[in-house]
């Protein structure tokens, strides 16, 4: 059988190296790597042009230049038919739903094992949609109307990507000091972001923010 051909797109070099090692050990052919939107579009387009695939693009959700959704948007304009499996540290509903709406065939989180990831890539390459049970629930709820996707998107559009990161950690109960350490920013910057989030969402406290995020399945 011909080896599965995969492009790895992730902005963390060490993570890409680890994933590449796991996939190659399982017989997967890594035809290219990319670290942001521009390099991903170029690498995937070139691989398609030369006839080297890929069968699947393993695509990080959050990256410099617009994220995984932007990669799919640009490639859709250029024409090459590509299958995407989204990969992220996040299991938040808006990330899952957003990237699936953009065109990904599945979504897995970065705590997945090597063999599980290879199986997921094989299944997506074969036309299946692949999600963990929890993430599949988000997608089903979105199509059933239980999650008001358009409303969630409208609210989140008011926030910058950094504000979304801060919002989610605060809503999960992190102290300002813990948020600062997690995101490599100062406590003062965290305070500024929290104030901005509360103002944009017209909320008055961390308690209200936690309820807001929980109601929208963002934590």
Image (tube, rainbow, N blue to C red):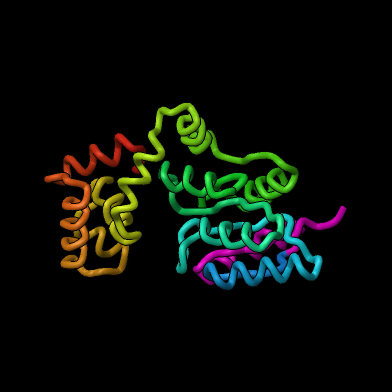
Q: Nearer the viewer, residue 155 or 39?
A: 155
**Residue at image point 81% right, 57% down:** 3
**Residue at image point 37% right, 45% down:** 153
**Magenta part of the chain:** 1-29
Residue found farthest to the right: 1
Vertical position of residue 117 compared to residue 216: above or below: below
Q: Residue 43, how many percent across, how many down? A: 66, 70
**Residue at image point 79% right, 66% down:** 52
Q: Nearer the viewer, residue 178 or 208?
A: 208
Vertical position of residue 33 compared to residue 117: above or below: below
**Residue at image point 50% right, 68% down:** 11
Can residue 85 be seen here? The reply is: yes
Q: Residue 140, how many percent across, how many down? A: 51, 30
Q: Residue 5, how many percent across, how many down? A: 75, 60
Quadrant of the image for the C terminus? top left
163 relative position to 84: left or right: left
183 relative position to 136: left or right: left
Vertical position of residue 19 compared to residue 87: above or below: below
């Amino acid at each position: 059988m011909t080896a599965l051909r995969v492009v790895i797109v992730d902005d963390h070099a060490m993570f890409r190296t680890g994933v590449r090692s796991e996939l190659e050990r399982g017989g997967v052919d890594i035809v290219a790597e990319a670290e942001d939107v521009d390099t991903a579009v170029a690498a995937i387009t070139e691989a398609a042009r030369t006839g080297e695939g890929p069968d699947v693009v393993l695509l990080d959700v959050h990256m410099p230049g617009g994220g995984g959704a932007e990669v799919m948007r640009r490639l859709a304009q250029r024409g090459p038919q590509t299958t995407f499996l989204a990969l992220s540290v996040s299991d938040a509903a808006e990330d899952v739903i957003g990237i699936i709406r953009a065109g990904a065939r599945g979504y897995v989180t970065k705590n997945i094992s090597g063999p599980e990831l290879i199986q997921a890539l094989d299944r997506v390459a074969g036309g299946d949609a692949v999600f963990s049970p929890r993430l599949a629930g988000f997608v089903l709820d979105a199509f059933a109307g239980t999650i008001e996707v358009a409303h969630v998107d409208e609210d989140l559009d008011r926030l910058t990507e950094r504000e979304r990161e801060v919002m989610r950690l605060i809503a999960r109960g992190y102290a300002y000091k813990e948020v600062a350490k997690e995101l490599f920013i100062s406590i003062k910057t965290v305070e500024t972001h929290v104030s901005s989030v509360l103002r944009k969402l017209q909320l008055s406290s961390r308690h209200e923010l936690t309820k807001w995020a929980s109601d929208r399945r963002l934590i």
